[in-house]
Amino acid sequence: MSKVALVGFNGETMCFVHVLLNALDMREKGLEVRVIIEGSSVRQIAELAEPAHPFAGLYAKVRDAGLIWAVCRACAVKMESLAAAEQQGLPIKGEMSGHVALADCLLDGYRIITF
């Protein structure tokens, strides 16, 4: 089985939606998937959790499937998204000077794709 880590850095909604779509598609095709929310994409945590948001259902599907492996602590603090991540019970990581250590994914055999 192949392993893929999808890293969202871009905070633009349509870019982040592609992270979510690919995560579900890859999982359905038998890949082991980790979604990492970094950079300005951490803003999407609160925005997409709003029930009225057009992509709320897609986000909930990825979140509820347990595909979100990490939210960057430093970026979430900077972008004022930490409380939303905590409220949603998302895993928050910051072992690399406050950020997610992508080397951990590589050491676990994951290929990294950034968005």
Image: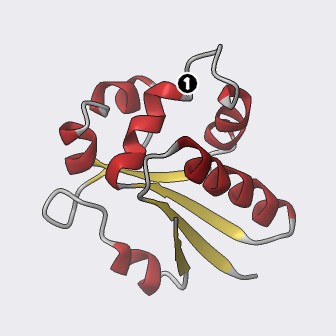
Residue at horizontal 38 percent and vertical 26 percent from the top: 84
Residue situated furthest top in the rendering: 52
- Residue 50: % across, % down: 56, 18
Residue at horizontal 55 percent and vertical 70 percent from the top: 5
- Residue 105: % across, % down: 45, 76
Residue at horizontal 61 percent and vertical 39 percent from the top: 63
- Residue 24: % across, % down: 76, 54
Q: Is residue 112 visible?
A: yes
Badge 1 is on which residue?
A: 49
Could you tell me the amino acid type at mark 1?
Ala
Give the secondary structure at mark 1.
Answer: loop
Is residue 79 shown above or below 100? above
Residue situated furthest left in the rendering: 97
Q: Residue 10's image quarter?
A: bottom left
Residue situated furthest right in the rendering: 29
The way the protein has been coloured in the rendering is secondary structure
In the rendered structure, the answer to whether residue 2 lies left or right of residue 83 reads right
Q: Residues within 10 Å of mark 1 (few under 14, many from 20)?
A: some
Is residue 57 shown above or below 19? above
